[in-house]
Image: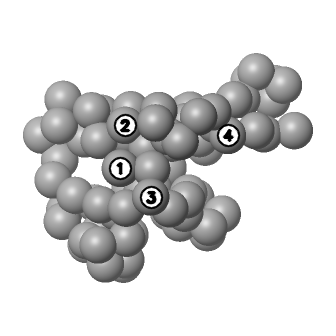
Amino acid sequence: MIEPHSSQKRGVMLGKYLADNEISQEELARRIGKSWRSVSQWCTGKSVPKVDAVILMAKALGLPINKVCELLGFDTSDIPN
């Protein structure tokens, strides 16, 4: 089962990943058809994206879904690679 880590950590790694890869929150929002406010809330841990948005982020960033879940602060240790 995927469990969220503490809300302090939730989303922070996504924001760091975007910054490290020179992708703005606005750019990710555009790529996945969501508002920049939604992406901002995901990056600060104020909200958690729905599964469809996680799938869209994985496609847009070229990452496996479990990696996106990790960036969002979810414990994925029970998910096989």
User: What residue is shown with label 3?
Assistant: 46
Give 5 or 18, whichever is nearer the viewer. 5
Given the image, on which type of amino acid does mark 4 rest?
Pro
Q: Is residue 52 above or below residue 3?
A: below
At x 31%, y 78%, the residue is 35
Look at label 2 and name its amino acid.
Val
Q: State which quarter of the image contains the C terminus.
A: top right
Q: What residue is rendered at 84% in x and 25% in y? A: 78
Q: Secondary structure at mark 1?
A: helix
Q: Is residue 41 left or right of residue 47?
A: left
> Is label 3 or label 1 in front?
3
Mark nearer the N terminus (2 vs 1): 2
Q: For the residues marked 3 and 2, what is the alpha-carbon distance in whole angstroms?
A: 10 Å
Q: Amino acid at mark 3?
A: Lys
Q: Residue 39 in the image: state x and y as whole percent.
A: 34, 63
Q: Residue 38 appears at what percent x and percent y?
A: 37, 70
The residue carrying mark 4 is 4
Instruction: Report which quarter residue 36 is drawn in.
Output: bottom left
- Lower position in the chain sequence, tag 3 or tag 2: 2
Judge from the rendering whether residue 70 lies leftward or rightward of residue 35; answer left or right.
Answer: right
Residue under numbered circle 1 = 43
Horizontal and vertical percent position of residue 75: 69, 29
Which of marks 1 and 4 precedes in the sequence?
4
Question: Label 2: which residue?
Answer: 12
- Circle 2 Cα neighbour tier, 10 Å, few/some/many (<14 / 14–19 / ≥20): some
When the figure is inspected, residue 49 is found, relative to residue 75, above or below; the finding is below
Q: Quadrant of residue 17?
A: top left
